[in-house]
Amino acid sequence: MNVAELLAGLQAQHDETTARASELRDRIQDLTAALAETEARLADLATTAKVIAELAPAGGEDPDPPETNTVYQAIVNAFNQHSDQVFRARELHELLGMPTDEASVNITRSRLGRLTRQGFLTQPGRGRYQKRT
């Protein structure tokens, strides 16, 4: 092999290595941009988690106050004890000894609607509720 051939071989290797270095620089640039986007997303997620944690009740407690849970339990118990009976909200109030003023009955109507959406109750007629069997 003569010197010209050696120099040509070295030049070819140099050109290949230069091209490879250029490709790697491009990949590094792409990865750097992707890393910056990912780190920004992580920061957004951390901020979102912090906001939710500040707004949510401490200790993962139920957002309904205990007295509300007690009312729900009384309603569920009434339907469990009278599983074949159909109730109107006012009749349920009378059965449970709860106030029968319109505001209280309307709150119970909302609770009955929630229990219906959750699948515990059915609504065989307008304003009438029964335990789902």
Image (spheres, grey):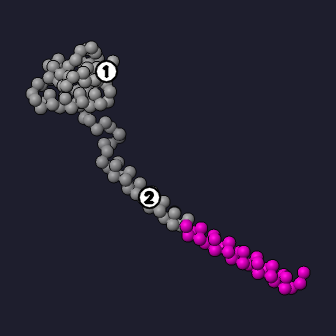
Q: Position of residue 50 (x, y in %)?
A: 36, 52
Pointer 2 residue: 41
**Residue at the limit of the structure toward the right, as seen here:** 1
Is 115 placed above or below 22 here? above
Foreground of the two, 117 or 40: 117
Q: Earlier in the sequence, mark 1 or mark 2?
A: 2
User: Label 1 is placed on what type of residue?
Assistant: Arg
Instruction: Pick out the residue farthest to the left.
Output: 101
Label disc, if present, on residue 100 of the rendered structure: none
**Chief SS of the magenta region:** helix
Determine if the magenta segment contains residue 7.
Answer: yes
| Res. 26 image quadrant | bottom right
Q: Is residue 96 visible?
A: no
Q: Does the image show residue 55?
A: yes
The residue singled out by tag 1 in the image is: 132
Tell whether label 2 touches label 1 (CB within 8 Å): no
Is 66 placed above or below 31 here? above
